[in-house]
């Protein structure tokens, strides 16, 4: 008889057990009519898991909660399960990577995703710290996977199942190609795993996030659906909000509102053409790329802006300053269709100056960029006056990473394209 797993349909923590069950020949089925925020707050559910979270597995000997524990249980139902490797040391390594997947990967993806989806308070420095910690973890993972197809041994183990389910949340919600391309072995690993038939049966077709979601305001607690049986206790007004994890429950797709910039009159300047010209020009940059830029530039459809970091005094450590700028460019991902940018990190010794040049669709800085990219307020913005030759020359020098720039060498130059 199938064991019953209590969770909603899109829950990545439940996927761990469902995939482990596929590999182990164990029958597990999802409970029917589960309603996040309602079913898991009912007295019957709280008897199974007093914290009221999913998943919970009902077994003949009583319930088990905590998704990793449930997945381990399902795997152990099969004697000598290869999901645990074939030796004591394999077993230790499987456990090692399960902890790594939970503490280093899942914890940081969660701290990045949930505030953005409105399930936790959004604090920019906390997001920055989570992304930095996640990159550290993915860097280590990338190193391991450079010479290993799977985490342990030469076939799928429970560690791969748990890690892939954790990465799944990141890939689907927030880790865009721009972000993951820094970790090519992790990418190869993830796409290999999610396309294994037993993973695919549970996960379906997986699509990578195309942009980092804009910060949403806090979500309201889930309300019972009309046809759902009423919980015996009325949900109290002061009941805690359903946690971020509810984001994993499936939601009906909403039509995407059009970006106001798509409604502007067409421009003769095609941003992608400029980006291609910039990327493909390898010599005679002034004559080819810079000249091409001004030939294409359309002041009716686009505007140019200088930005100057307001707190240059704080830029005392080179790699922290570089990370700060990389973080800014990453958060600008949402504007990729409408912007091009150059950021210069200037000086040979600290404190470093950070100055940039941005090309935006429209005559003003797009409002959604101001609203959604908190870095914008860390810079002074000044519109470029293109009738002023000195300002135009400054634009040219920023585009071509001219060195020295304003009398100083460049520590680095980064491009957003
Ligand atoms: N460490 C737990 C996390 C469980 C968890 O956070 N579950 C979320 C859904 S994925 C939940 O039930 N949230 C509801 C709530 O916080 O009230 C596990 O791995 O099972």
Image (cartoon, rainbow, N blue to C red):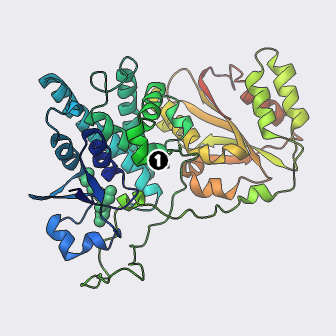
Q: Can you say whether 355 is above or below 40 in the image?
A: above
Q: Residues within 10 Å of mark 1 (few under 14, many from 20)?
A: few
The spot of residue 300 in percent (x, y) is 88, 50
Question: How far from the left and from the top, in percent, is residue 286?
Answer: 83, 21
Residue 57 vs residue 179: left or right?
A: left
Q: Quadrant of the C terminus?
A: top right
- Which quadrant of the render holds ligand 1? bottom left
Residue lying at the far left in this picture: please name it: 61
Q: Position of residue 305 (x, y in %)?
A: 73, 44
Residue 147 located left or right of residue 158: right
Q: At x 60% / y 44%, what residue is drawn?
A: 332
Give the labeled residue for mark 1.
204
Q: Residue furthest front?
A: 1
- Any part of residue 66 in sight: yes
Tell me residue 68's x, y (percent): 23, 46
Residue 136 found in image quarter: top left
Q: Is mark 1 within 8 Å of ligand 1?
A: no
Query: Foreground residue, 302 or 336?
Result: 336
State the residue in front, 143 or 316: 143
Placement of 55 over or under 158, stated as above or below: below
Q: Residue at x 32, y 38 (%)?
A: 161
> In which quadrant is the N terminus drawn?
bottom left
Give the mark count: 1
Q: Nearer the viewer, residue 375 or 203?
A: 203
Q: Residue at x 17, y 64 (%)?
A: 49
| Residue shown at the point (73%, 25%) measured from the top left | 279
Q: Nearer the viewer, residue 339 or 86?
A: 86
Asked if one can make out residue 316 in the rendered structure from this viewpoint, the answer is: no
User: Which element type, helix, strand or loop, lies under badge 1?
Assistant: loop
Left or right of 245? Residue 356 is right
């Amino acid at each position: 008889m199938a064991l019953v797993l209590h969770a909603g349909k899109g829950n990545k923590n439940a996927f761990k057990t469902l995939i482990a069950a596929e590999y182990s020949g164990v029958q597990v089925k999802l409970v029917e009519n589960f309603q996040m925020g309602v079913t898991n707050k009912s007295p019957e559910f709280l008897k199974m898991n007093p914290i009221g979270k999913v998943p919970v597995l009902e077994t003949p000997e009583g319930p088990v909660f905590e998704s990793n524990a449930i997945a381990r249980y399902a795997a152990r139902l099969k004697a000598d399960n290869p999901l645990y490797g074939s030796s004591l040391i394999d077993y230790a390594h499987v456990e090692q990577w399960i902890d790594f997947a939970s503490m280093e990967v899942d914890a940081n993806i969660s701290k990045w995703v949930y505030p953005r989806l409105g399930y936790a308070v959004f604090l920019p420095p906390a997001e920055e710290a989570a992304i930095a910690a996640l990159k550290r973890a993915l860097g280590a993972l990338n190193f391991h996977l450079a010479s290993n197809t799977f985490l342990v041994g030469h076939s799928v183990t429970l560690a791969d199942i748990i890690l892939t389910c954790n990465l799944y949340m990141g890939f689907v919600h927030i880790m865009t190609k721009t972000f993951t391309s820094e970790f090519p072995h992790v990418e190869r690993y993830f796409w290999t795993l999610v396309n294994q038939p037993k993973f695919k049966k549970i996960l379906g077709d997986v699509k990578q996030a195309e942009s980092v979601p804009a910060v949403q305001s806090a979500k309201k607690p889930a309300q019972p659906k009309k046809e759902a049986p009423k919980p015996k206790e009325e949900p109290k007004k002061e009941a805690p909000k359903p946690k971020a994890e509810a984001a994993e429950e499936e939601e009906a797709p909403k039509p995407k509102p059009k970006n106001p910039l798509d409604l502007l009159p067409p421009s003769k300047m095609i941003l992608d053409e400029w980006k291609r010209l910039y990327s493909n020009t390898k010599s005679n940059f002034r004559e080819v790329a810079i000249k091409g830029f001004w030939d294409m530039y359309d002041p009716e459809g686009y505007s140019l802006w200088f930005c100057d970091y307001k707190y240059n005094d704080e830029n005392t450590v080179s790699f922290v300053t570089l990370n700060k700028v990389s973080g800014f460019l990453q958060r600008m991902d949402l504007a990729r269709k409408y912007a091009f940018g150059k950021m210069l990190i200037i000086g040979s010794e600290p404190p470093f100056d950070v100055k940039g040049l941005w090309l935006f669709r429209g005559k003003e800085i797009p409002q959604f960029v101001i609203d959604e990219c908190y870095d914008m307020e860390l810079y002074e913005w000044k519109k470029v006056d293109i009738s002023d030759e000195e300002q135009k020359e400054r634009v040219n020098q920023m585009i071509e990473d001219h060195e020295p720039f304003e009398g100083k060498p460049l520590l680095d130059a980064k491009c957003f394209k």
